Image (cartoon, rainbow, N blue to C red):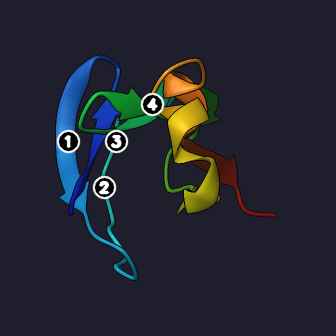
């Protein structure tokens, strides 16, 4: 199953478990989120300068709690984080 990556309200790519994806973005402020079916992730706001690389990670949550995540926690089913 592929997760969609949405940057500034535009689909910029799809990624599957274990994959790595590089996306070129213009310098400036951006908002990134991920989506799978009707569930999604938190939004991350970040600022990119010319020539800068930012690494993010995307992971799923505990599958045993899926009932919660497909109802009340729809936008926290996936976890998007900036890697330090």
Instruction: Tell which of 23 and 68 is nearer to you.
Output: 68
**In the image, which disc is placed on residue 23?**
2
Left or right of 82? Residue 79 is left
Give the residue number, with chain letter if any, for mark 1: 12
Q: Position of residue 76 (x, y in %)?
A: 60, 32
Give the residue number, with chain letter if any, for mark 4: 70
Mark 2: secondary structure: loop
The CA span between labels 3 and 1 is 10 Å
Whether pointer 2 and pointer 1 mark residues with C-beta atoms closer than 8 Å, the reply is yes
Residue 21 vertical placement versus 24 (above, below) = below
Left or right of 26? Residue 81 is right
User: Which circle's residue, 2 or 1, is located before the other in the chain?
Assistant: 1
User: Which circle's residue, 3 or 1, is located before the other in the chain?
Assistant: 1
Whether pointer 3 and pointer 1 mark residues with C-beta atoms closer than 8 Å, the reply is no
Crowdedness near tag 3: few (<14), some (14–19) or many (≥20) residues, C-alpha within 10 Å: some
The CA span between labels 2 and 4 is 28 Å
Instruction: Tell which of 70 and 27 is nearer to you.
Output: 70
Give the residue number, with chain letter if any, for mark 3: 25
User: Which circle's residue, 2 or 4, is located before the other in the chain?
Assistant: 2
User: Which circle's residue, 3 or 4, is located before the other in the chain?
Assistant: 3
Direction bottom: furthest residue: 18
Q: Is residue 54 visible from the viewing direction of this image?
A: no
Q: Position of residue 45 (x, y in %)?
A: 62, 25
Whether pointer 2 and pointer 3 mark residues with C-beta atoms closer than 8 Å, the reply is yes
**In the image, which disc is placed on residue 56?**
none
Mark 3: secondary structure: loop
Between circles 2 and 1, the one closer to the viewer is: 1
Between circles 1 and 4, the one closer to the viewer is: 4
């Amino acid at each position: 199953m592929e997760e969609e990556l949405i940057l500034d309200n535009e689909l910029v790519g799809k990624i599957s478990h274990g994959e790595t994806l590089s996306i070129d973005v213009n310098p400036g402020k951006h908002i990134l989120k991920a989506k799978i079916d009707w569930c999604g992730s938190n939004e991350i706001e970040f600022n990119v300068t010319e020539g800068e690389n930012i690494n993010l990670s995307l992971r799923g949550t505990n599958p045993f709690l899926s009932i919660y995540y497909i109802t009340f926690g729809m936008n926290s089913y996936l976890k998007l984080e900036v890697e330090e």
